[in-house]
Image (spheres, grey):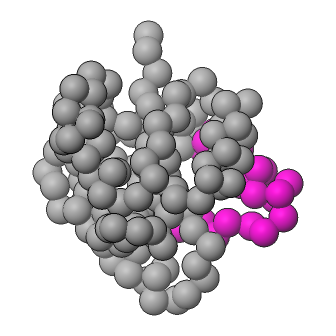
Amino acid sequence: MAHRHILLVEDSANDVELTTSTLAQHVVNPVDVARDGAEALDYLFRRGVFAGRTTGPPALVMLDLKMPKVDGLEVLRTIKADPTLKQLPVVVLTSSREQRDVVQSYALGVNAYVVKPVEFEQFADSLRQLGLFWLLLNEPPPVA
């Protein structure tokens, strides 16, 4: 059985490297990366370079907030407003501790809001726990 992909939406090359390498150690799901919000929406809606994408919807979207082109809140708003995508689990994974970002993320329907720890080991441990919970413990709705 093929494992559903994780969509990591992150513009920081360092955070992409740390996240993908940490997840690869703990979960078998492949990780696809979008470097900005516009690319993430193209991936999700199979547009542009992703028009021929043959994989189903991701098992999990890990979403940074502060990104170029389209910010994470707009990506979240678009996901949760779309009938075919609204049940996708979305975890905001950001450095923002701003209360308005937290409040707005939950108002838009985010499933979890995680502030990236500064320390490498804590960040890696947070990613491990996120991956294990959302991909192994959480019971998602059936894929349509």
Q: Position of residue 3 (x, y in %)?
A: 46, 21
Residue 47 or 104: which is nearer the viewer? Answer: 47
Q: Position of residue 56 (x, y in %)?
A: 29, 28
Answer whether residue 101 is visible to the viewer in this image: yes
Task: Pick out the residue farthest to the top.
Answer: 1
Q: Is residue 62 left or right of residue 13?
A: left
* Residue 106: quarter of image: bottom left
Residue 73 or 37: which is nearer the viewer? Answer: 37
Q: Residue at position x 45%, y 68% from top?
A: 67
Residue 125 lies in the magenta-colored region? yes
Q: Is residue 126 above or below residue 134?
A: below
Q: Position of residue 47 (x, y in %)?
A: 19, 41
Q: Residue at position x 52%, y 59% from top?
A: 11
Q: Is residue 81 left or right of residue 3?
A: left
Q: Quadrant of the C terminus?
A: top left
* Residue 27: quarter of image: top right
Q: Which residues are magenta?
A: 112-133
Q: Position of residue 21 (x, y in %)?
A: 70, 37
Q: Is residue 121 above or below residue 116?
A: above
Q: Residue at position x 43%, y 48% from top?
A: 34
Q: Is residue 97 left or right of residue 25?
A: left
Residue 77 or 11: which is nearer the viewer? Answer: 11
Answer whether residue 109 is visible to the viewer in this image: no
- What kind of secondary structure does the magenta stretch mostly adopt? helix
Q: Quadrant of the N terminus?
A: top left
Q: Is residue 76 left or right of residue 81?
A: right
